[in-house]
Amino acid sequence: MPTCKECKQFFPMEENPAQGDCVQRVVDPRQAYYKAKPVMGDMDASSCSSFQKK
């Protein structure tokens, strides 16, 4: 079972490395931007469509 902390898009917080942000680059017709959502590093990522192994 892959976890969020094994993903390239997981960036841990300095205060608490067990928590972090899942950062994804989104491109639409007018612009490109980054979308971040807070996640725990030990969350199950097997159903995540954007999971990329480090």
Image (cartoon, rainbow, N blue to C red):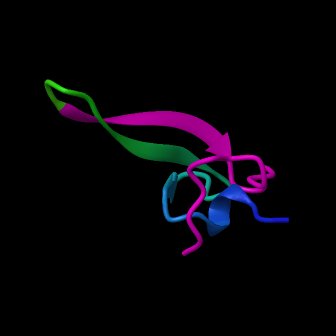
Range of residues picked out in magenta: 32-54
Residue drawn at 61 percent across, 52 percent down? 16
Residue 7 lies, in percent from the top left, at: 59, 63
Residue drawn at 60 percent across, 57 percent down? 51
Residue 29 lies, in percent from the top left, at: 19, 27
Task: Specify the farthest residue to the right.
Answer: 1
Residue toward you, 4 or 29: 29
Q: Is residue 28 above or below residue 42?
A: above
Position of the C terminus by quadrant: bottom right
Position of the N terminus by quadrant: bottom right
In the picture, measured across the screen, residue 28 lies left or right of residue 38, that is: left
**Corner quadrant of residue 30:** top left
Q: Is residue 40 magenta?
A: yes
In the picture, measured across the screen, residue 48 lies left or right of residue 28, that is: right
In the picture, measured across the screen, residue 14 lies left or right of residue 30, that is: right
Count of number-bearing discs: 0
Task: Specify the farthest residue to the bottom.
Answer: 54
Q: Is residue 44 magenta?
A: yes
In the picture, measured across the screen, residue 50 lies left or right of residue 24, that is: right
Task: Specify the farthest residue to the left.
Answer: 30
Please, what is the dominant secondary structure of the magenta stretch? loop
Residue drawn at 52 percent across, 44 percent down? 21
Residue drawn at 59 percent across, 71 percent down? 53
Residue 18 lies, in percent from the top left, at: 68, 56
Residue 35 lies, in percent from the top left, at: 40, 34
Task: Specify the farthest residue to the front.
Answer: 29
**Corner quadrant of residue 25:** top left
Q: Is residue 34 above or below residue 9?
A: above
